[in-house]
Image (spheres, rainbow, N blue to C red):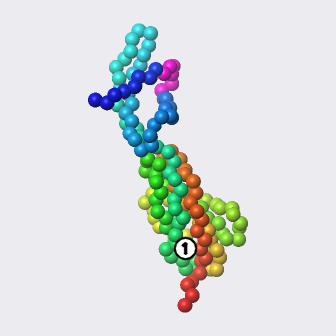
Amino acid sequence: MADYLDSVLSTGNTLSWRVDVGFETGKEYDFKVRALNDVNQGSFSQSARFMAAKIPIAPLKPTSSFADQTSITIDWLPPYNGGTPITSYLVKWNLGGNGDQFFDLVTVDDQVLPFTKTGLTTGELYKFKVIASNFIGAGPESDVISIYAATKPK
């Protein structure tokens, strides 16, 4: 049987409670709840299991697995997930002449790797970066990959 720490929290009519200190990322924790009033305390609820997690780290710099005159395919390795599964990736992009300002291109689920952007202009420079998210939130951005939409020289 697991050991449980007793913690008294006066919540009034509040039905939720946030615990956000002292947990190890990736480790599972069981919680039980019981009511307490001026007369007595109730029995414990069934145990609920949670895993301590944080946002994922940045993916490594994406790579290009294909580029032609009008499309570019980028790929990236899934980063450390922060202790809970990656739920999606945000691909951001920049047309090379637009300075350092990046725009959201598409959000893809965790199973969509690689990603192909079509409808590009031949000879233009495109920049891409990727952000991984889990249920805690979005992590930091990857490094930028710069790729021209063009055919390879013969």
* Residue drawn at 55 percent across, 73 percent down: 72
Which residue range is magenta in the image? 9-15
* Residue drawn at 54 percent across, 77 percent down: 67
Q: Is residue 122 magenta?
A: no
Percent coordinates x, y for residue 58 in the rendering: 53, 56
* Residue drawn at 41 percent across, 9 percent down: 39
Task: Name the outermost residue toward the left.
Answer: 1
Q: Could one spot residue 105 in this view of the protein?
A: no
Asked if residue 153 is positioned above or below residue 26 in the image, the reply reads: below
Asked if residue 52 is positioned above or below residue 81 in the image, the reply reads: above
* Residue drawn at 52 percent across, 62 percent down: 60
Q: Amino acid at mark 1?
A: Ile
Percent coordinates x, y for residue 148 in the rendering: 61, 76
* Magenta stretch: dominant secondary structure: loop
Of residues 26 and 147, the one drawn nearer to the viewer in this rendering: 26
Of residues 30 and 122, the one drawn nearer to the viewer in this rendering: 30
Q: Categorize mark 1 by other alpha carbons within 10 Å: few (<14), some (14-19), many (20+).
A: many
Question: How many numbered marks does the figure carry?
Answer: 1
Circle 1: element type: strand
Residue behind mark 1: 72
Residue 36, picture quadrant: top left
Q: Quadrant of the N terminus?
A: top left
Residue 103, picture quadrant: bottom right
Q: Quadrant of the C terminus?
A: bottom right
Asked if residue 19 is positioned above or below residue 125 in the image, the reply reads: above
In the rendered structure, the answer to whether residue 91 lies left or right of residue 46 reads right
Task: Name the outermost residue toward the bottom.
Answer: 154
Task: Name the outermost residue toward the top.
Answer: 39
Q: Could one spot residue 117 in this view of the protein?
A: yes
Of residues 66 and 71, the one drawn nearer to the viewer in this rendering: 66
Percent coordinates x, y for residue 41 in the rendering: 38, 15
